[in-house]
Amino acid sequence: MASSYSTMVFVATLFVLAASISATEYIVGDQSGWTLDYDYQTWAKDKVFYVGDTLVFNYASGSHNVVKVNGTGFQQCTAAASNGTLTSGRDVIALQTPGRKWYICGVAKHCELRNMKLVITVLPMSPAPSPSASSTLAVPTIYGMLVALFGGLALLFG
């Protein structure tokens, strides 16, 4: 009976992890982070973003922020008060739906004069790891899956 329960837990764990195996964490701007005078469009150009991936905006807290906007807000570097502003200095945004996503820095004129804005297109969930998963600053969740897999095996056979 315990073996049957362990098998069910193991199989359920595999199903949950299978959905996240292709998820990739992207550090926006790589080593530069979220900063002034960086070309975020060039940074994003060769990356393929999928539902389930995450964006991490690293910056000195108090110096910048991250605001999700629409296309008009992106072009005009303006944000509605209801958009919600992220200010932690390590803002993690889960890409939960497909489509265009726009982000700007709402501090002073960082967006309009210093190029602090990012637009990406998010594709539906990928059945395989994204091509950019080999990037040194894109951290695939496969490591977490391997830990869970070996932990599940230990429960199953332990």
Image: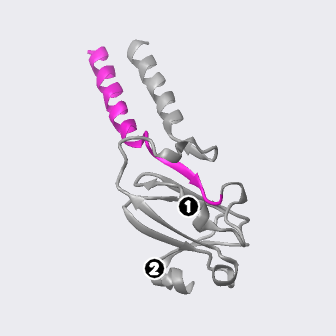
Considering every residue shown, the one lying at the far top of the view is 157
**In the image, residue 15 above or below residue 54:** above
Quadrant where the C terminus sits is top left
**In the image, residue 11 above or below residue 53:** above
Residues 117 and 2: in front is: 117
Return the disc, 1 or 2, that comes first in the chain's sequence.
1
Quadrant where the N terminus sits is top left
Residue shown at the point (44%, 41%) measured from the top left? 129
Nearest-to-viewer mark from 1 and 2: 1
Q: Amino acid at mark 1?
A: Ala
Indicate whether residue 21 is drawn in magenta: yes
- Dominant secondary structure (helix, strand or loop) of the stretch shown in magenta: helix
Q: Which residues are magenta?
A: 1-29
Q: Amino acid at mark 2?
A: Gly
- Disc marking residue 71: 2
User: Which residue is tagged 1?
Assistant: 44
**In the image, residue 3 above or below residue 98:** above
Q: Locate residue 153, reporting x and y percent.
A: 42, 19
Q: Locate residue 120, reporting x and y percent.
A: 49, 65
Cα–Cα span, label 1 and label 2:
17 Å
Residue shown at the point (67%, 80%) measured from the top left? 107
**Residue 79 seen in this snapshot:** no
Q: Locate residue 108, reporting x and y percent.
A: 69, 84
**Quarter of image, res 91:** bottom right
User: CB of mark 1 within 8 Å of CB of mark 2?
Assistant: no
**In the image, residue 61 above or below residue 4:** below
Indicate whether residue 14 is drawn in magenta: yes
In this rendering, position of residue 108 left or right of residue 41: right
